[in-house]
């Protein structure tokens, strides 16, 4: 249940799992944050002004039901304050993520998080008061005052949440507790990015490498198989040393989620999270059902991988190297931008104009640096500026793919903000990841079509297959694990590091055909659950898998020349958060993600990619 404005209006961060390697590229770009605040002093003034406004929000309590004018005035004031609080938060989060070792940046980020928590606490009375006024009177007010249209979706969403909304005092207490209940993610971030002492190993050619998050991400795909085994054995042995602490951290995160679902009288934590986005439970269950039914297709891919690598006893450390070794050249930032622009031409001029605007601006923090946050993301929460993109660009093909992915998010934000007021510009992750994943599919087909040799074509075909493995099968496996963790706590079972490794290991083995002899999973590698940051994002990961499903559904049709489907996709992106994501997809494009038919295109794509590879072998 959205208990405040912030949960509805703030555009969620959208992430990828890539991690940085500390290169010294000549093409690095750093974002210009003066477009948000001219300097730290301006941010400090904004903090003081916002805190004063937050402190005064209680004066609005009790005024909403007096008239349409009073409802509009209160909603507009809270919306404007929410926009400013988000702006303050994003500014300091972007600075912090540039170098998480910076103590001053950590302190400012903590203050911004505290302000956000204060805002949620100060507006916790909103939902109970709207419910007390009642749907009939709220609808009368909306009909009487056209300027309430911007707030209509949130008001109706609050009314929908009546069964899960508590009295004003209890809502205030829950808001006060939000910072403490969300601390597990920050503990994980501190360990993963700053505190764990990462080991150094010597590879077969004498190179010493540090197996940090970044080092593991790079060297797990080493061409020498013994090097890969060394990387896996050493990296996961390090995580296993922190198994108990990470288990306690994860248990705290899950317990907080279960507490929130129970106190709001949801059937389960899953139901609570799907409710917030208006998603039918069948979306989740249909995904898991269809992916499990397709495991034989996944096992066909793993067997093909073993054949192409010349490995009879495929192991988990054989997952990441490319199927063929080929020199594709460097994909530096300039080349990545040029190729992305060409690959996305099927979207048409409106989309390309927005992409050009972003690529010409100083919107990115492009390359790895010591202390920089791992991974990649787009933050589109500063409504009246523009999106900001964090990358860890390594000048390789994976970096190009990530580049296209994150700029899909950025154009989505631009379309949503151009076609919606602030109040409905924020969109669901459910559509957000389709906007980025479809870019990866278009990029893959462009690279395959423009390959200079059969070997290069095999490389790109293999990369496309690996994308389906990582996004559809791996993320659905994550989703099953996340659900299993929550269900265990809901049954009253304790979660410990060893227990989580046991649960995760069982899923790893089932998905990868361990018992069928397809791929062997060593027990030590079951510590992988502790490495995944997305488990702290509350039922986020399943939406990667639904997104590649939806993206394949759209791409299959408009790559075949169906301009109506392409235009429908642009309408979906432009709709922002004006309705629930499932409704937008169904009503704007005819895509029903509760239907088994929605999953057929991505599986057809996987078969087609394997067929094309086998025809070249």
Image (cartoon, rainbow, N blue to C red):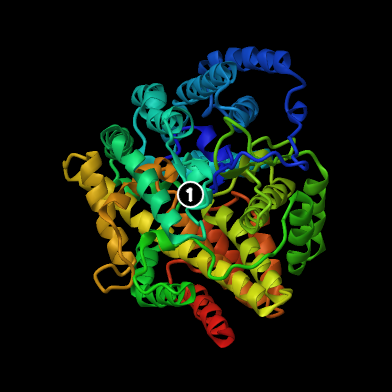
Of the 4 image quadrants, the one containing the N terminus is top left
Please indicate whether residue 261 sits to the left or right of residue 76 in the image. Answer: left
- As drawn, 113 above or below 543: above
Q: Is residue 291 above or below residue 541?
A: below
In the picture shown, does residue 311 fall above or below 320? Answer: below
User: Quarter-wise, where is residue 400 in the image?
Assistant: bottom right
Where residue 199 appears, x then y in whole percent? Answer: 42, 37
The residue shown at (65%, 59%) is: 397
The location of residue 147, given as percent across then percent down, is: 68, 39
Instruction: Name the residue located 47 percent from the left edge and 44 percent from the top edge.
Output: 202
Percent of width and height locating residue 293: 34, 74
Residue drawn at point x = 22 percent, y = 40 percent: 495
Give the residue at mark 1: 203
Mark 1 neighbour density, 10 Å: few (under 14) some (14–19) many (20 or more): some
Report which quarter residue 451 is drawn in: bottom right
Q: Is residue 349 above or below residue 390?
A: below
Q: What element carries label 1?
A: loop
């Amino acid at each position: 249940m959205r208990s405040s404005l912030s949960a509805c209006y703030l555009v969620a961060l959208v992430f990828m799992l890539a991690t940085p390697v500390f290169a010294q590229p000549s093409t690095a770009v750093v974002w210009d944050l003066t477009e948000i605040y001219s300097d730290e002093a301006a941010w400090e003034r904004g903090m003081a002004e916002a805190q004063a406004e937050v402190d005064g929000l209680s004066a609005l309590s009790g005024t909403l039901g007096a008239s349409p004018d009073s409802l509009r005035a209160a909603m507009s004031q809270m919306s404007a304050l929410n926009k400013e609080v988000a702006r303050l938060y994003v500014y300091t989060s972007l600075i912090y993520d540039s170098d998480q070792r910076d103590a001053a940046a950590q302190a400012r980020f903590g203050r911004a998080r505290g302000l956000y928590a204060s805002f949620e606490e100060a507006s916790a009375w909103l939902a109970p008061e709207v419910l007390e006024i009642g749907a009939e009177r709220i609808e009368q007010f909306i009909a009487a005052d056209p300027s309430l249209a911007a707030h209509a979706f949130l008001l109706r969403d609050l009314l929908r949440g009546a069964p899960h909304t508590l009295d004003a005092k209890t809502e205030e207490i829950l808001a006060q507790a939000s910072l403490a209940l969300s601390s597990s993610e920050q503990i994980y971030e501190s360990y993963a990015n700053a505190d764990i002492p990462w080991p150094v190993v010597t590879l077969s050619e004498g190179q010493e490498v540090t197996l940090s998050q970044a080092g593991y991400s790079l060297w797990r795909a080493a061409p020498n198989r013994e090097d890969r085994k060394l990387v896996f054995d050493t990296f996961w042995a390090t995580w296993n040393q922190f198994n108990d602490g990470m288990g306690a951290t994860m248990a705290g995160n899950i317990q907080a989620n279960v507490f929130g679902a129970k106190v709001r009288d949801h059937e389960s934590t899953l139901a609570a999270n799907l409710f917030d986005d208006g998603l039918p439970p069948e979306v989740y269950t249909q995904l898991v059902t269809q992916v499990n039914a397709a495991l034989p297709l996944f096992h066909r891919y793993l067997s093909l991988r073993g054949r192409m690598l010349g490995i009879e006893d495929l192991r988990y450390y054989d997952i990441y190297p490319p199927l063929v070794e080929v020199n594709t050249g460097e994909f530096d930032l300039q080349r990545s931008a040029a190729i992305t622009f060409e690959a996305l031409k099927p979207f048409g001029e409106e989309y390309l104009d927005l992409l050009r605007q972003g690529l010409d601006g100083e919107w990115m923090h492009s390359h790895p640096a010591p202390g920089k946050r791992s991974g990649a993301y787009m933050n589109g929460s500063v409504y009246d500026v523009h999106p900001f993109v964090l990358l860890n660009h390594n000048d390789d093909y994976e970096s190009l793919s990530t580049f296209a992915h994150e700029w899909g998010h950025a154009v989505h934000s631009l379309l949503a903000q151009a076609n919606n007021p602030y109040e409905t510009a924020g969109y669901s992750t459910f559509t957000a990841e389709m906007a980025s994943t479809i870019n990866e599919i278009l990029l893959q087909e462009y690279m395959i079509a423009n390959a200079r040799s059969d070997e290069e074509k095999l490389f790109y075909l293999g990369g496309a297959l690996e994308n389906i493995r990582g996004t559809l099968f791996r993320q659905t496996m994550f989703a099953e694990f996340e659900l299993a963790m929550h269900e265990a706590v809901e049954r009253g079972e304790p979660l410990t590091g060893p227990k989580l490794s046991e649960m995760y290991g069982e899923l790893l083995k089932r998905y990868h055909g361990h018992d069928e002899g397809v791929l062997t999973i060593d027990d030590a590698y079951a510590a992988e659950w502790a490495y995944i940051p997305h488990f702290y994002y509350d039922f986020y990961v399943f939406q990667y898998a639904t997104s590649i499903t939806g993206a394949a559904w759209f791409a299959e049709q408009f790559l075949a020349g169906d301009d109506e489907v392409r235009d429908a996709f642009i309408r979906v992106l432009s709709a922002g958060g004006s309705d629930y994501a499932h409704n937008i997809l169904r009503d704007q494009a005819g895509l029903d993600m509760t239907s088994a038919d929605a999953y057929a295109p991505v599986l057809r794509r996987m078969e087609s990619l394997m067929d094309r590879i086998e025809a070249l072998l």
